[in-house]
Image: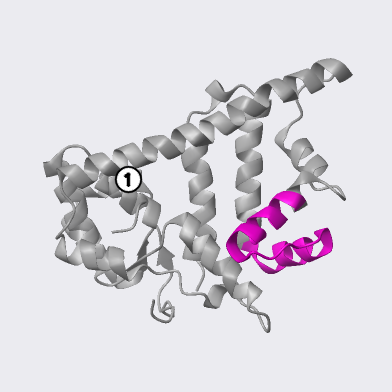
Amino acid sequence: MKKFGRARPVLRNPALIFDNSAVNRLTDDPQRALLQPGISAGFCFRLAGDTFGEIVATPDATRRQALLDLCKCLVTTGDCLQPHDELLMNVIKEHSKGGSYDWRAVDVTCKEYEDEIARQEFIDDNIAAEQRRFSAEIGSEFAQIHEDARPHFEKLFRRHGTTPPSLSELVKALQMPGGAFWSLGAGGYRKATGTTLGEAAARDFVDACPPFRALLMALCVAQHQRSVQNPARDQQACSTCTRLYTYPIASSS
């Protein structure tokens, strides 16, 4: 989401993370008054930044307000996370500082989002429309990347007389020595830090940072669903990958 510090909190209770569909279902649940205190007492609720962005983009003002009011109650005993792109950038930058590295110690909370959920000073129909436009642009760019790659895969399959590989076969091929999995990882590291990693160093970082591995795996899933297989088979590929970006960090204690 477009943006409108502190030390990372230690989670006293298990983390509970909802996607947008879960927030909507709890908002509508007739037992919400009973469920909500239990959630607050038994869990540390963590609102993913991308879920917050989807809520902000809700076109109907009354519905949007109901969703925000629920989040306000839940975040009171929890926190809100950064958007997945910023979150991963910070995890990578921490590694580039050198020394002992623990990705779980990186602060991934977003005080600005928490303040807006509490005060609700800026979100209105105009902000909602802007967020929808922003999300649509990102979604179009994401889809176009894989649409452009699809003819190259199809040509490769025809040339070698092979059928499209399964996801596990694709990942295995990409993770071979010199494979695109590692160059993609090195590219992500360079984008965040300006430092170019060789394959061995990229492998070491992927091993040291499971959330970054999840990012790379999410991109493999997206490539398989949208470039290798029929993209119409899974219209939720983009949102699924976004969850993979965020949740490994969000659920750690």
Q: Does 98 sit above or below residue 27?
A: below
Q: Is residue 228 above or below residue 9?
A: above
Seen in the image, is 225 located left or right of residue 77? right
Segment colored magenta: 183-210
Q: Is residue 6 left or right of residue 106?
A: left
Q: Quadrant of residue 133?
A: top left
Seen from the viewer's position, the closer of residues 30 and 22 is 22
Residue 145 vs 122, above or below: the answer is above
Q: Position of residue 246 (x, y in %)?
A: 49, 56
Side of 204 relative to 72 (left or right): right
Secondary structure of residue under mark 1: helix
Q: Which quarter of the picture shows residue 44?
A: bottom left
- Count of numbered circles on the image: 1
- In the displayed orientation, state which residue is furthest to the bottom: 99
Q: Residue at x 52, y 68 (%)?
A: 90
Q: Residue at x 35, y 52 (%)?
A: 2
The answer to whether residue 43 of the structure is visible from this angle is: yes
On the image, numbered disc 1 is attached to which residue? 54
Does 58 lie within the magenta span?
A: no
Q: Residue placed farthest to the front in the image? A: 194
The image quadrant that residue 191 belongs to is bottom right
Q: Residue at x 42, y 67 (%)?
A: 15
Q: Is residue 207 within the magenta segment? A: yes
Nearer to me, 64 or 94: 94
Instruction: Give amino acid for label 1.
Output: Glu
Identity of the residue drawn at 28% across and 72% down: 77
Residue situated furthest left in the rendering = 62
Residue 182 percent coordinates (x, y): 76, 52
- Overall secondary structure of the magenta stretch? helix
Query: Where residue 39 appears, x then y in whole percent?
Result: 30, 64
Whether residue 29 can be seen here: no
Q: Position of residue 108 (x, y in %)?
A: 45, 69
